[in-house]
Every structure is written in structure tokens, then in C-alpha cells.
Image: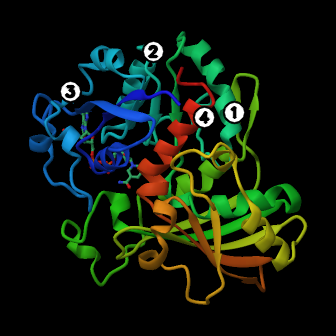
Amino acid sequence: MKKYNVGIIGATGMVGQRFATLLENHPWFNVVALAASPRSAGKPYKDAIKKWLMAKPMPESMKDMIILNATDDVEKIAGMVDFVFCAVDMNKDEIKALEERYAKAECPVVSNNSAHRHTDDVPMILPELNADHAKIIPEQRKRLGTKRGFIAVKPNCSLQGYVPALFPLHKEFGVKDVVVCTYQAISGAGKTFESFPEIVDNVIPFIGGEEEKSEKEPLKIWGKINGSVIEDAKTPNFTAQCIRVPVSDGHMGAVFARFEKKPTKEEILNIWKNYAGRAQELELPSAPKHFLNYFEEDNMPQPKLNRDLENGMAISIGRLREDSQFDYKFVCLSHNTLRGAAGGAVLMAELLCAEGYMD
Ligand code: NAP
């Protein structure tokens, strides 16, 4: 595989720092541009960072890179890189416009932001599930008037346990109704225990916008390309409650599911055990070898013990049992800043490179 030069837009933020550590020794990607707000532009990366939040140290190769201005240097950055990763804290319309500016400058954008998730020709990809949605990219390029430039987004972190667990069951058994309660880590709010003392010994039963994302985004992942758009699926019906809990990393989900045709427990476990997606077929560098991992122990999975499974890219599932009101209930766990944020975006970028969309 050839090497791709990449940029990180929002490099000083929490997700940006995660990108920096994940890309440091990446076999295909070489970071040549870091960008952030005008507050950071012009400073070396090591001085622009207010606080380094990663367990791994800041990459030596990036410490002295001068931060570019994410909004003023679009053309310059587009000329330096093959594509950019984007994770910025701006309002939705500003992000939409900024990402389109990069795309129109012929610089593909692999985005962590939610702004374009419901733009109907922007693929929202979880590489093990709906890699085929990348086929919409030529249609998006037509709309944007670009040859190379396009935007691809990753889905929200909250759904990255229960959607992978349910998606492979749908084809054979038809997932009909799903109730999910998520227990979400504080890093999803860009926080640590130090910066979020009110979460210690506490639970906060509200995360702005999260329940809507958790209910709506799965329908796009389940959707189908029709002409120049991705049409959302009509089912399954999802209802969600999202709760912030005092955990540093790792979102849990407690799931109840009803099927068109009720599977046996063994059938579900077999599908999970044997499931492999396009990311595994292509043996992408960040893909977990085994995507869906079932734990037999009653008290597993747990964020502290299992979130780092396969570098935080694998999904952990447990406690599958029949339910008195639905067909089955189970719990699931995914690492929210790895699989759910920067890691998922790096994996999607690998997929898009392997499928030829970045050439
Ligand atoms: P963050 O820590 O607040 O970082 C925000 C980044 O955006 C910084 O690099 C900041 O640069 C830059 N920025 C802010 N205002 C800007 C402007 N006007 N122009 C250009 N750059 C600007 O936020 P985060 O937690 O990394 O989240 C970033 C994005 O990823 C958000 O859209 C968030 O919803 C999404 N996301 C986050 C997570 C998570 O787990 N945290 C998960 C999934 C998705 P300065 O340092 O110069 O201000």
C-alpha cells in the first residue's frame, strides 16, 4: 500500500490528540499538517496544546509542527495532503461549510463531527457493517463538482456497541423493536475526572442530542443507496435513553430487542462468533481480528476490564438472555474515543484507501 499524507483538523482537541497518537506510526498514513482555531495557529503543536490528555506521550514527530489555521488555510492544507481527518468544536453550520470547503478544494474529509451525518449523499460508515455505502461517493462528487473531494462521516459513539451486535442478526431474523439504555463515559463529553468533578459519585440523566442520534443514526446505517442518495431504513424502531456515568472511557448499552422471527440463543451466539465485515476481509491495519466478542461470565463485559480489547476496536457483548416482554436482552460495550471516535475514523479512512476512493 502506498503512503498517504494526511492532516488533522482540530489537532489540539481531545479527538485530535487521539488522532495524533493513532497516526504516529501508522503503516499507511503520514501526518504532514496539523490545524486548529486562530487561537492556536502559528504556534508549535507542543505550545498550542492546553493539556495533553492521552496516556501515550505527544508524538515526537509532531511536537514542533506549526499549527495551521483550520479556516483560513484550507487551500494550503489541501495542497499538502491526500486527505484530512476533522474533529472540531464549532457550530453545526460552520462545520458543514468548513468540511465542504475542504472537499471542494479536492481534499477528502474523514469526519468525526456530526454536522453532515444526515446529508443524504454523505456516507456514514461503520466499516464492518455498511462499507458498501462508500459507493455513494461518485454521486456526492457530482453534486460538489469535484474530482477527488468528498466527505465521509463516522456514526455517533453511543451506538457503536448495540448497532454492531444487532446488524448481523437483521438479515436472517429481522430486528423489529429495540429499547436501549446507554451508560456513557465522560471522555465522550471531552472530560476527565479532573475537569468534571460533579460526575464523581453521581450519574447525570441527560446528554444533549444523544438520544436522537442513538435512535436516528442506526436507520442510516441500515439504509440503502437509491440513485444519488442513501435512503434511511424504516425499521428497526429504536428508542433510547442516554445517561452519563462516572467512567473515564467506554460506553455500555443495555439492550432489549424484538425480532420478526425469534432466533434461538445459539443462533445469535453463532452469528456473533462468526461475523466478519469488509474491514476484516480487507485485513485493514486498524481492524480488530475478531469484531464481536461474547463473554459468558455474568458480570462481564466491564468498561475498565474490556474497553481496550483489540486496541479498543473490538465490541464486547454479554448477558444474552430471553426477556419476558421482548425476545432477548443483552449488554454491550465499545471504547467511545477509539472505536467510537478517532479509531473508527482511522479505520474508515483505511477502508476508503483500500477501496480506491483516496487515489
Ligand atoms: P475539543 O477537545 O473541544 O477540541 C476542539 C477542536 O476544535 C480544537 O482543536 C479547537 O482548536 C478546534 N476549534 C475550536 N473552534 C474552532 C474554530 N473556530 N476554527 C477552527 N478550529 C476550531 O473537542 P473534541 O472533544 O475533540 O470534539 C471535536 C469534535 O468531535 C466535536 O464535533 C465532537 O462532537 C466530536 N466528537 C467527540 C467525541 C469525544 O469522544 N470527545 C466523540 C465523537 C465525536 P483550539 O484548541 O485552537 O481551540
Say what amino acid the circle numbered 1 marks. Answer: Ile
Q: Which residue is mark 4?
A: 123
Percent from the top left, x then y, of residue 357? Answer: 58, 25
Q: Residue at x 74, y 32 (%)?
A: 225
Percent from the top left, x then y, of residue 153? Answer: 51, 38
Q: Earlier in the sequence, mark 1 or mark 4?
A: 4
Q: Nearer the viewer, mark 1 or mark 3?
A: 3
Q: Nearer the viewer, residue 358 or 324?
A: 358
Q: Earlier in the sequence, mark 3 or mark 4?
A: 3
Q: Is residue 117 visible?
A: no
Q: Which residue is mark 1?
A: 230
Tag 1–tag 4 contact (CB < 8 Å): yes
Q: Which residue is mark 2?
A: 106
Measure how far apart labels 1 and 4 are at the Cα level: 8 Å
Q: Which residue is mark 3?
A: 68
Measure how far apart labels 1 and 3 are at the Cα level: 34 Å
Say what amino acid the circle numbered 2 marks. Answer: Glu
Q: Residues within 10 Å of mark 2 (few under 14, many from 20)?
A: many
Quarter of the view holding residue 25: top left
Measure how far apart labels 3 and 4 are at the Cα level: 28 Å
Q: Nearer the viewer, mark 2 or mark 1?
A: 2
Residue projecting furthest to the bottom: 298
Picture quarter with ligand 1:
top left
